[in-house]
Amino acid sequence: MPASEAFSRRHLALAFAILMPFLALALQLRLWTSIEPLAFVLFYPALVVSSWIGGRSGGTIALILSIVLADWFFMAPLQSLRVDDPAHIARIVAFSLIGILIIYAHHRFQLRTERYQNTTENIDDVVWVLDAETQRLRYVSPSIVKQLGFAPAEIMALPIESALTPTIAAQVRCLAAGDTALGNTVTEEVRKTRKDGSTVWTEVVMTQARNQRTGKQEVHGVSRNITARKYAEEQLKVSEQRMRKMLDNIPTAIACCTLGSKAEIVFLNRQFVRIFGYSLDEIPDLGTWEQLSYPDEQSRRNLTLPWEMAVGTIPRESAEGMESRILCKNGSMRDVLINADRLEDMMLVSFTDITERKQAEQRLRHMAQHDALTDLPNRVLFDEHVSVALATARREGSRFGLMFIDLDHFKKVNDTMGHRIGDLLLLEVSQRLRQAVRESDIPARLGGDEFVVLLQHVHHAGDALRVAEKIRTRLGEPFSIENNTFSISASLGIAIYPDHGKDSISLARNADTAMYHAKQSGRNAITLSESGAAA
């Protein structure tokens, strides 16, 4: 309200407060010629109206004028304003007290009214009241102009289907009829057309209530402009769709889950489903995912470490980039690198498929530790096995043996039939060697036509000699390679720990010496080392 308009209204109210006691005086003088006992009868209505219209200031002015006029014209007419009669004094005191109460009551009521009006007329939300019996709007707050561009009178003149929406109108009728299925409060989001043709999203919250003054059933509602919120939700939805599309098209498998005790999985990107084969319906939470995809306890531990890192229960540096093996839906195993990051109340986990890299590393490791022709362990890997066997034997007080094997007349076959036939012969020798040794024994090729065998679980020399005899017999059988049949033999030397050496160097030297003695004694023979442990 403009300041000039408020100022004029205030002056008008004060003028009315001054006029009302004189009107009451004129009416009393006209009705009665002598009404001394009832001097204030018609001043009471004047006081009530003056305080109602003029507020506290108007009521106070009317109270003072009423006392002066009553005293002047009825208690001591045309004499003076001095009051000596105790009865007159009592009337003035009683009238003053009652007047003060009337002014105070009106002032409190006006404060509540002004507070309500300030609340309803100055907020952006539109407050409205609908008469349940007539189905017409009885009140619409002025903020409707800002929200929809219509004046309150224009909205109240419309049927509720147009003023609100057909859907809300139907719900209003249900509320007015006491439909308990809707509950006491109904909330609805609708898109409304403004007076200028633009649209605005509003959230309508309405409830049924009974007017305590009239006893009539009413529907009270609040319409809130939620256009900004709807726009933000739409932008968030677009952003989420964009993010999902980005996550779906990156080559890394992504899973998103909650941080609660159940750890529900809420998102899997397309690469995750492609690599592992599991859909979101099949692994709704972390527990199900663990049971399906982690076959052993160590792998399961590798999974939980990034989770614990993300929620802060263990240091981040100790769990970042964990390697693990995952059992896919089709039964295959995939090697992955797991990383996890906490996003407020969610956790984003990435699975980088490193299967091909691990296979390449394994192939390189195999090539570095195995003979390229026969695929038997080479000297490097064989020495590692000997070191392990030596440590075990020292710790447990057990025995093991080393067997050196040299092929007899191999150089003749290689020179006369060519290196290709020689390589095929070495390949056939390695296969027969695998078949002749025990499951616990480890054969290897040192180079050329020299082979070695680590004889584990040897209780006495007889165990080693039986294995050696089986190998000698098997290698002494004729070979048939590319329609060529020929025979070779093998010379074998054996050294046993700790009888023929207490370290790998002395054992190897004594086994090699024993093999040399076997060749010197006519080849195709087995010789047990005669050197003691001190040798």
Image: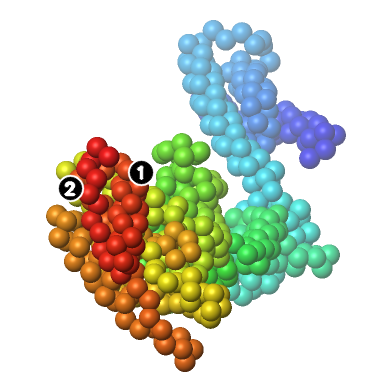
Q: Nearer the viewer, mark 2 or mark 1?
A: 1
Between residues 246 and 418, which one lies in front from this camera angle?
Answer: 418
Q: Quadrant of residue 464?
A: bottom left
Between residues 279 and 332, which one lies in front from this camera angle?
Answer: 332
Q: Residue at x 79, y 35 (%)?
A: 6
Query: What label sits on residue 505 in the rendered view?
Result: 1
Between residues 338 and 122, which one lies in front from this camera angle?
Answer: 338
Q: Residue at x 80, y 65 (%)?
A: 198
Q: Position of residue 49 (x, y in %)?
A: 63, 37
Q: Residue at x 38, y 64 (%)?
A: 406
Horizontal side, residue 341 vs residue 492: left or right: right
Mark 2, residue position: 398
Residue 261 appears in view: no
Q: Position of residue 138 (x, y in %)?
A: 62, 60
Three-letter code, disc 1:
Ile
Three-letter code, disc 2:
Ser
Position of residue 130 relative to residue 482, above or below, is above
Q: Earlier in the sequence, mark 2 or mark 1?
A: 2
Crowding near the residue tagged with mark 1, few <14, some 14–19, many ≥20 C-alpha atoms within 10 Å: few
Q: Position of residue 95 (x, y in %)?
A: 53, 23
- Disc 1 is placed on an element classified as helix
Horizontal side, residue 180 vs residue 514: left or right: right
Position of residue 471 relative to residue 498, above or below, is below
Query: What label sits on residue 36 in the rendered view?
Result: none
Between residues 280 and 153, which one lies in front from this camera angle?
Answer: 280
User: Which quarter of the rendering shows the C terminus?
Assistant: top left
Q: Alpha-carbon distance for marks 2 and 1? A: 18 Å
User: Which quarter of the rendering shows the N terminus?
Assistant: top right
